[in-house]
Image: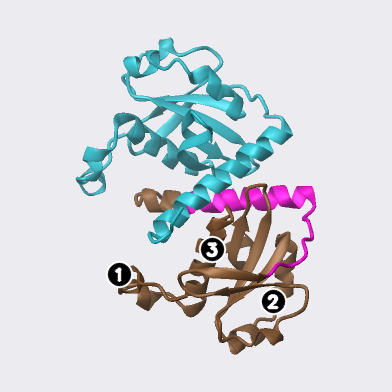
Chain colours: A cyan, B brown
Amino acid sequence: MFHLAFMTDLAPPFLDTRAPGQLLARGVCRHLRGHDFVTLEEFTPERGKRLDVMALGPRGELWVIECKSSRTDFTSDGKWQGYLEWGDRYFWAVDEAFPTDLLPEGTGLIIADAYDAEILRMPDEVRLPPARRKAVTQRFARHAALRLQMLRDPGLIL
Amino acid sequence: MFHLAFMTDLAPPFLDTRAPGQLLARGVCRHLRGHDFVTLEEFTPERGKRLDVMALGPRGELWVIECKSSRTDFTSDGKWQGYLEWGDRYFWAVDEAFPTDLLPEGTGLIIADAYDAEILRMPDEVRLPPARRKAVTQRFARHAALRLQMLRDPGLIL
């Protein structure tokens, strides 16, 4: 997954300011666009929970993707099971060097870099109950629109 | 509604590139934030329809706001009745000089400038059917997230 865009696309300060997990997230989001999913990074479905990537599909599907840049990044995360309840499918996104045998069975696997990604294992779907889907979709909509408004109107007072 | 922020906030090229209706929309969006509504400008709920402002409230309310900068802008719009079906409430947003007696009964009225706005007449609520609300909210979410992704990742190929 080598890209000629490297020199222009990740010029400083961009290269310097994103953590490894955030670069994986970018590749994941690009790839999911090809599946007609839109994405929100660092989405907070409720207080105290932050999902690396939440993806919303063309038929309202909700996928949760956690990005792990290293073994330590994975083993130090004691909260991931609490993320299962926010989506219909749950994926890990890791780079090519990651020891994927660490990952729990039944979860999805995405291999990513900063530029692209690939879904290697599609997890089973566990459909959210309708009321929860409605609430999560609405929250997703509000987060995305508010972030956008903050960008297009720096004079906005929250 | 005079604001000291004028000199810094609307410095060129920003001042030069927004149409009068878009400046009203900005004031409307700022004001609605105070009601805990998030907003999306120039939202396309379906092919061929473009709403100036779609607002999503804290309990999932959907409000449609059309911004009219002049009498001509209003009278040349033959499509507004087609916008009623996309929200629970429908508003016009106009500036202080607008001849508001032109506006049809039963619609809401917001007086706006580029910096703020005020709701002068709250229209009756006509609640969207649940299936339609779900579809519009989902479309809103996807539009907002996609626009955001385009901004945060200029390398995205749509």
Residues beneath discs 3 and 2 located on the same chain: yes
Quickly name the residue at label 2: B79
Residue toward you, A18 or A11? A18
Q: Is residue B48 above or below residue B141?
A: below
Residues beneath discs 3 and 1 located on the same chain: yes
* Precedes in sequence: disc 3 or disc 2: 3
Indicate yes or no whether the magenta region holds residue B141: yes
List x then y, in percent, for residue A124: 61, 22
Quickly name the residue at label 3: B31
* Precedes in sequence: disc 2 or disc 1: 1
Give the residue type that dot 2 points to: Lys
Quickly name the residue at label 1: B8
Give the residue type that dot 1 points to: Thr
Secondary-structure class at tag 1: helix
Closer to viewer: mark 3 or mark 2 = 3
Q: Is residue A114 left or right of residue A82?
A: left
Q: Is residue A140 above or below residue B148?
A: above
List x then y, in percent, for residue A63: 56, 32
Q: Write down the quadrant of residue B62 in the picture.
A: bottom right
Q: Is residue A34 above or below residue B111?
A: above
Work out how far the residue at label 3 is from the one at label 1, CA to CA, in angstroms. 20 Å
Residue toward you, B21 or A20? B21
Secondary-structure class at tag 3: helix
Q: Main secondary structure of the magenta part?
A: helix
Question: Does any portion of residue A122 appear in the rendered image?
Answer: no
